[in-house]
Amino acid sequence: MTEATDETPQRVDAETVVELAKRRGFFLQSCGAYGGVSGFYTFGPQGAALKRHLEDAWRERFTVQEGHREIESPTVMPEPVFEASGHLDGFDDMLVECPECGESHRADHVVEDDTDIEEAESLPIPDVEEVIAEYELLCPNCGAGLAGQAVEAFNLMFETNIGPGSSDPGYLRPETAQGIFVEFPQLREYARGKLPFGITQIGRAYRNEISPRKSIVRVREFTQAELELFVDPEEDEPPLEAVRDVEAPLYSAAMQAEGTGPRTMTIGEAYDEGVVGDPWVAYYLGITKPWYEAVGVDMDRFRFRQHNPGELAHYAADCWDAESQVDGDWIELAGFAYRGDYDLSKHTEHSDEEFTLFKQYDEPKTVERATVDPDMSYLGPEFGGDAADVADALERLAERDRSAFEGDEVVVEVGGQEHAVPTEKAGFAVEEVTEAGEHITPHVVEPSFGIDRLLYTVVHHAYREDEVDGEARTYLDLEPAVAPTSVGVFPLESGGEMETVAREVVADLRSEGLAVTYDDSGSIGRRYRRQDEVGTPFCVTVDHRSLDDGTVTVRDRDSTEQVRVPIDDLPGTLTALRDGDRTFGDLA
């Protein structure tokens, strides 16, 4: 029996991981036969399987176990969706172009790479221009000076046309979330109008990155796994007690400003002390940390970091990122945001639907209600075809902001154009009415996960180098539940009865749902090494003794220990090992 030695996580460089990934079929740059295309990657047989297993693990934890429902929406949606969401106006990165070679770069990345400034993305454009000039920063491509070059906002949306011609513009979705939000009027019916309810989606998203880099860490096409939880902000609370004792490394905005942290604390302590202000965000941090650990993220290279005020999206009251350390840098794996009612309110304003939900009172209430009764004899001649839309806008404004009607005129926006209406023509009034309930706009809590970056992190963190019988070995210490292949099956000799038995073993294991590879090429040691390098946790060898007593050797990837197991027991034994119900030590 051979034994591995010096098994410790390796601080491996990106070049080594990318070389292994391409050679062993995890991922590679797309369209290599045509010179490749930056920002697009193909997942090979190993990578596609690993990616699918990570998606399934996410689905099991964040959809099935949480009692949510999953949908699948189109990757192309019409322009009005993104007008409402704000992506057309504010979904930008900072671009600076080299005056010599013409190469475009993300200005904030240039700043972060060559200065001590972190999170330059949160800085205003004029400040970034000043930093480039002050530090005399150079083009990463040719070395020319970038001082004095204009930094411009570049929209990341991929534009297309829906149908022939250009009369119906559309965009590839930059996130999967909008596909959930736009279907809320129907989704609330599926939920029978009861809050809270969650909708999940796993799918591709597209961003026309200025300078894709770091392999699959920053790309133009990627997979997101997102959960949109719709809650009543006045009544709904998370089951925080279920995660109160989960410990996690937290790096708050205050710690970042003070130059301290991260600090490991329980989720309960973090919420009680106000480090994490929103209970829903705290809850999702609590279920996410053990999930990341279960799929293979090294907890010594993991943290939750709170967004600084300059980083916060305009819709977010609070936001935390899950981050992993790879290649010496911290990269974002997921974001946890309390989005308030921003998304549903915007779609209510821009569409013909009400993105609200009727909340019935326990008993009828007498309340003051703001109403309008516009003078259409004035609105019609004054605004023509927009008159009805102006009237609708006045009604929505009265519900949202009574103070807007305190002056001599009230201003509403229709189709991107402002219209002023004399207040007396709006017919504004506040009346007492008895109501059985009210229409509320639910708030949204959003955990959003990047699958591609998680895959890169898991491969990176699983990389190991050791020695077996004095020979150097490289292997991936992948968790059995997510490894691309569960079992490698080898006949000690090809041909004859051993091969027949080995192929029968393969068929039996596959029929039980195990991912199995068969290999009869080369020495048994070489076959072990091939499976080690792609992270296959267990190997089965059919040898001479197998023909006599009906047993085979089962080899553990990490320790390289081997035990004999009856062939009839193999499916149940290997399934239990893969699912974590048994350990290899139990067999030994």
Image (tube, rainbow, N blue to C red):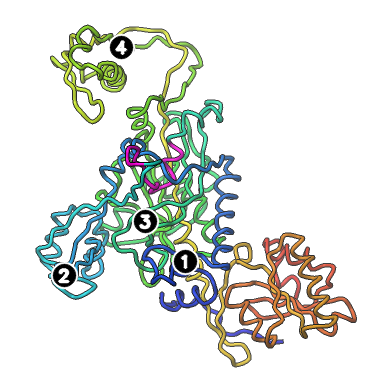
1 or 2: tag closer to the N-terminus: 2
3 or 4: tag closer to the N-terminus: 3
Q: Nearer the viewer, mark 3 or mark 4?
A: 4
Q: Between marks 1 and 2, how big is the CA–CA gap?
A: 30 Å
Viewer-proximal residue, 249 or 291?
291
Q: Residues within 10 Å of mark 3 (few under 14, many from 20)?
A: many
User: Residue 549 magenta-drawn?
Assistant: no
Q: Which mark is residue 305?
A: 3
Q: In x, y percent, where is residue 273? A: 38, 47
Q: Which mark is residue 81?
A: none
Q: Amino acid at mark 2?
A: Leu
Residue at the front extreme, as displayed = 164
Query: Which residue is tagged 1?
Result: 456
Q: In x, y percent, where is residue 55? A: 55, 55
Q: Residues within 10 Å of mark 1 (few under 14, many from 20)?
A: many
Q: Between marks 4 and 2, how big is the CA–CA gap?
A: 58 Å
Quadrant housing the C terminus: bottom right
Tell me: 416 left or right of 100: right
Magenta stretch, residue numbers: 165-181
Query: Which residue is tagged 4?
Result: 371
Q: Which of the 4 image quadrants contains residue 207? A: bottom left
Residue at the bottom extreme, as displayed = 470
Query: Which residue is tagged 2?
Result: 137
